Image (cartoon, rainbow, N blue to C red):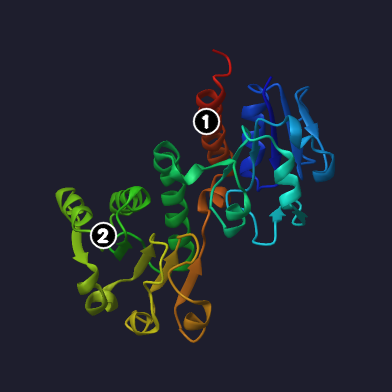
Amino acid sequence: MLHVAILGGDRRFLALIETLSAYVDTLYTVGFDESADNVNVVRSSLENIPFEQLSAVIVPVQGIGDDGSIDVLNGQSEQLSTAHVERTNKDCIWITGVRTDFFTKIKDRKVMSFLDREDVAILNSIPTAEGCLQLAIEKTDHTIHGSQVCVFGYGRCGQTIADVFKGVGANVTVTTMVEKEEARAAQRGFQTLLFAEFEQSLDSFDIVINTIPAHVFTPNVLQQLKPSAFLLDISSKPGAFLKEDVTSLSNIVMNVPGLPGRVAPRTAGEILGEATRKILEKEFRHGS
């Protein structure tokens, strides 16, 4: 028997619930009053979850707060404690997105991340890139066609973002700290810059999109932005810049981690649902 609990999450998890409800024996949910009715789905409170019976626990993609807080769909939060964790058996797996510091308190339990999965990263790059394009259209006063666009980082998201902007006629330059990524971008026909060259060229870009989860945009770097440039940071914590470093800028600056959940929550949730099904299949050989 496969019993799974979903503790909080955003609108992506509505599609995740729909996918998993057809696969597991019992699916307990916390914070999803608007999820579809299903005989296998039990809407519950955190205190009424039978942790001792669970095969897996799924928490929000953004992880759990250091104090155990879990965001739920209605905008409130639930409070998870180490006591809840200790009630699960040692075969129970915990599935998250971001591995926040709370997970260091989870001893003798397997913790897995959606973000470590190649299939999730590649598929998620599509709604991510579409979301970047949508925001660029909304936040600039010129066409994307003909714009000078810099994509910072050429991993799975960066590759798709560069392709999407090139596809609508932008002049795309890829900046990376990794020589292998620079070679790959050049092979695909993009202009490239290594990070050491980036600061000197920053004032030539109309749109700058960062995918690297590191403080690469220091005050000195930010000062090199063209005053009208749009800076979009889609990276997860710690983000590309400190909030206090951008407040004095005239630029439109946005930090929007978890973009797939904002622009295409159903598609993003279906991606997570299929990934979770594969995880459970591998870990528990359910249905074999």
- Tell me how many marks there are: 2
Q: Looking at the figure, which quarter contains the N terminus?
A: top right
Residue type marked 2:
Val
| Residue 96 at x, y percent in the picture | 57, 45
Q: Looking at the figure, which quarter contains the C terminus?
A: top right
Residue drawn at (84%, 39%) of the image: 48
Q: Secondary structure at mark 2?
A: strand
* Front residue of this view, candidates 198 and 114: 114
Q: Secondary structure at mark 1?
A: helix
Image position of 253 with respect to 159: above or below = below
Q: Give whichever of discs 2 and 1 has the lower sequence position.
A: 2
Residue type marked 1:
Ile
Image position of 157 with respect to 230: above or below = above
* Occupied quadrant, residue 122: top left
Q: Nearer the viewer, mark 2 or mark 1?
A: 1
Residue drawn at (62%, 28%) of the image: 19
Q: Is residue 73 visible?
A: no
| Residue 161 at x, y percent in the picture | 35, 52
* Residue corresponding to mark 1: 279
* Front residue of this view, candidates 103 and 189: 103
* Front residue of this view, candidates 14 and 167: 14
| Residue 166 at x, y percent in the picture | 28, 53
* Residue corresponding to mark 2: 172
Residue drawn at (70%, 36%) of the image: 5
